[in-house]
Amino acid sequence: MRSELSHRGPSPLHFRDFRLMWGGFFVSQVGTQMQVVAVAWQVYQLTGDPLALGAIGLARVLPVIVLGVFGGVFADVVDRRRLLLGTQTAMMLCSLGLWWLTDSGRVSMPLLYAFCVLAGSATALSNPARQAMIPTLVPEATLPRALGLSVSSWQLATVLGPTLGGFVLATHGPAAVYLLDAASFVAMLVTLLLIRKRGKAAPTTSVGLDALAEGFRFLWRTPILLGLMLADFLGTFFAGAMLLMPIFASELLHVGPQGLGLLFAAPAAGSALVALGIALLGSPPLAGSTVLICIALYGLATAAFGATGSFPLALLFLALAGAADGASTVVRQTLRQLLTPDHLRGRMTGVTMIFFMGGPQLGELEAGALARFAGVRTSVIVGGLLCTASAAVLALVLPGLRRYRLYGSEPA
């Protein structure tokens, strides 16, 4: 049975502020995803070490773990639009810093990691505010489709960004990629200045430990959200291997930096098609079983990618993995937004971000360490199979998650 919300309400693009946010975020994400390819390739060129590639994930996730929850608190008590203006400006400055260091020949591994930490800190404060604003831009009946379009915007950017990034990287080098990334933030900044909604959800709440504790109390009283976060973390931790793509592109599939861009883009292509279909046709069942099945398929497709020596098949398996992950993401985000009151949405996004970003980024470190000692292919295959196994284990040990279905479902 589909969610009652999946068939009601006008298109989210009918609403001006959502339309502006959707477009501005898309442009800035294209630049950000171009930067992801450039940083990975630059680290590979400097070191050739899979563990050094995996450590990029650690540099990006540490500030999310430390600041993510506090970013959620800020998103619930301050003007969300003003917070986004500050964090997007900070990210633009990080990209300009990477451009200057690379163009002047001063770039080094410690500096690359340092800028990843700085950009991750801005992301930890930015993502809760952006996601918490979305439900304030559209009516509740339109929210599942709005979230589907938001995911599709991110995934389409993750298709176009790496593809363009690989081309610019091959023709002009990483400095040009970083400069284009900095320019892309202008679109988001202009969008935020044009949006009428301020997005301040709880003016009577103050920043402090009490506000933080309120968010954790709500999470403890809503076990389905805890179950979804755990499922997401375990699945993406075991199957996280995107930062090993420079080795696949250079040594295993022999496709160079342009092929690297396509490898980064392929999962997003599959996810974008799924997310766009959800936005146009309605969501799949808003159920825990949907998430568990998607995680299992994601792991199998990742393992198949690790085993193939064919570039077209590699793209196909990565696209299938992305499609499964995209469906899971929309269901999880929709459930979280619908089950969370508006004044707590920023805090729940902050907590979720630790799982959502912590899983894959820490997984990149795990994949890099295993790849150094057991080989790159073994690392990806084993990780994919463990991802599928984690979904099966969660289905057994968390029956409430397996049975949960929004509207008329058995409670978790």
Image (tube, helix red, strand yellow):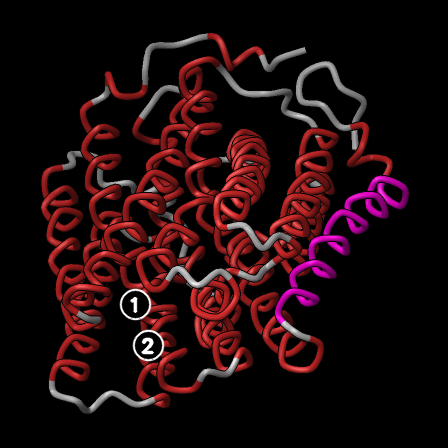
Question: Residue 408: x, y in percent?
Answer: 73, 14
Q: The disc labelled 1 sits on which kind of residue?
A: Ala
| SS for dot 1 | helix
Q: Which residues are magenta?
A: 376-398
Instruction: Decide: few, some or many residues near mark 1? Use Cα within 10 Å; few <14, some 14-19, many ≥20.
Output: many
Question: Residue 185: x, y in percent?
Answer: 16, 55
Left or right position of 360 against 405: left
In the rendered image, residue 199 lying in the magenta stretch gets the answer no
| Front-most of residues 345 and 328 | 328
**Marks 1 & 2, CB-CB < 8 Å contact:** yes
Please name the residue that numbered disc 2 is placed on: 42
| Residue for point 69% across, 82% down | 373
Is residue 54 shown to the viewer in this render? Answer: yes
| Residue for point 22% across, 28% down | 19
Q: The disc labelled 2 sits on which kind of residue?
A: Gln
Please name the residue that numbered disc 1 is placed on: 38
| Front-most of residues 24 and 164 | 164
| Magenta residues, dominant SS class | helix
Is residue 29 shown to the viewer in this render? Answer: no
Question: Residue 213: x, y in percent?
Answer: 59, 59
